[in-house]
């Protein structure tokens, strides 16, 4: 039997990349796509024959945390897996409390996504190793909301790059989206790492999100 999937994702490029990954598996049937939580609930009211929702955690109108809580209240049989860029401790914790059954990084491979979906529907609490470590850190350390945002001197183009990284796009996809070369994207990202004093994109997205840059 096919697995009926709903996707709630407001970024068209991240959505396209996700649908491409899901398309590799004939047992996954994308029944509906929503741009935010309100749109998702409206569509579910017309057709709730959904096994699992892949839920972006940051969306306009109604975010993934609020939408997860409403989906679980109205349709407790539907599983929810959160889509994230590994960025916000507070939202991650709230999503757990709202009833999320699993977590995916937006950059996860097709194999990881499929495995997470099947594990979740089998009754597990599926998440990537990186997300499992994040959850353990949340348990070990209290969430602090007192950090003041910093200005790292990022340009508008560099912030655009960070935003696209946060949405799970690869360097190649960013280059296509912005009509620039792969080399140019790499150069911008290297500048971002230098200014933020980080070593990889997860650290960069985390730091930019903590300081409300993206």
Image: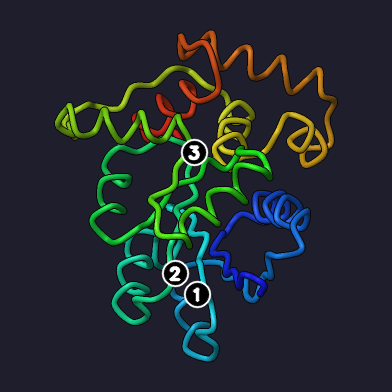
Residue lying at 67% horizontally and 52% vertically, measured from the top left: 18
Residue 82 in the image: above or below residue 3: above
Q: Is residue 4 left or right of residue 97?
A: right
- Which residue is drawn at the image coordinates 42% and 28% (left, top)? 206
Q: Residue 14: which disc? A: none
43 on left or right of 210: right
Q: Which residue is mark 2?
A: 37
Q: Is the N terminus in the top left, top right, bottom left or bottom right quadrant?
A: bottom right
Q: Earlier in the sequence, mark 3 or mark 2?
A: 2
Tell me the CA gap for discs 2 and 1.
5 Å
Circle 1 residue: 40
Query: Compared to 61, does 136 lie above or below?
Result: above
Residue 164 picture quarter:
top right
Which mark sits nearer the N-terminus, 3 or 1? 1
Describe the element under mark 1 as helix, strand or loop.
helix
Mark 2 residue crowding within 10 angstroms, few (<14) / some (14–19) / many (20+): many
Under circle 3, the secondary element is loop
Q: Are marks 3 and 1 in contact (CB under 8 Å)?
A: no
Q: Nearer the viewer, residue 75 or 83?
A: 75
Q: Which residue is mark 3?
A: 85
Using residue 124 as the reference point, say whether residue 4 is left or right of it. Answer: right
The image shows residue 160 at horizontal and vertical percentages of 61, 35
Q: Quadrant of residue 101?
A: bottom left
**Residue in view at x 29 percent, y 77 percent:** 73
Can you name the residue that lies furthest to the bottom here? 46
């Amino acid at each position: 039997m096919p697995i009926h999937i709903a996707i709630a994702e407001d970024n068209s490029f991240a959505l396209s990349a996700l649908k491409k990954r899901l398309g590799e598996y004939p047992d996954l049937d994308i029944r509906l796509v929503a741009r935010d939580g309100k749109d998702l609930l409206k569509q579910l009211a017309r057709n709730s024959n959904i096994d699992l929702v892949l839920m972006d955690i940051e969306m306009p109108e109604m975010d993934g945390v609020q939408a997860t809580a409403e989906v679980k209240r109205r349709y407790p049989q539907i599983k929810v897996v959160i889509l994230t860029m590994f960025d916000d401790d507070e939202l991650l914790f709230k999503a757990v409390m709202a009833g999320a059954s699993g977590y995916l990084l937006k950059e996860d491979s097709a194999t990881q996504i499929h495995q997470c979906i099947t594990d979740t529907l089998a009754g597990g609490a599926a998440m990537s190793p990186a997300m499992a470590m994040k959850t353990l850190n949340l348990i070990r350390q209290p969430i602090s909301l007192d950090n003041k945002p910093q200005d790292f001197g990022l340009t508008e183009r560099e912030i655009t790059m960070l935003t696209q990284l946060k949405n799970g796009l690869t360097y190649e996809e960013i280059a296509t989206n912005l009509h620039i070369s792969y080399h140019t994207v790499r150069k911008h990202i290297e500048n971002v790492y230098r200014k933020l004093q980080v070593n990889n994109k997860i650290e960069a997205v985390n730091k930019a999100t903590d300081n409300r840059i993206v």
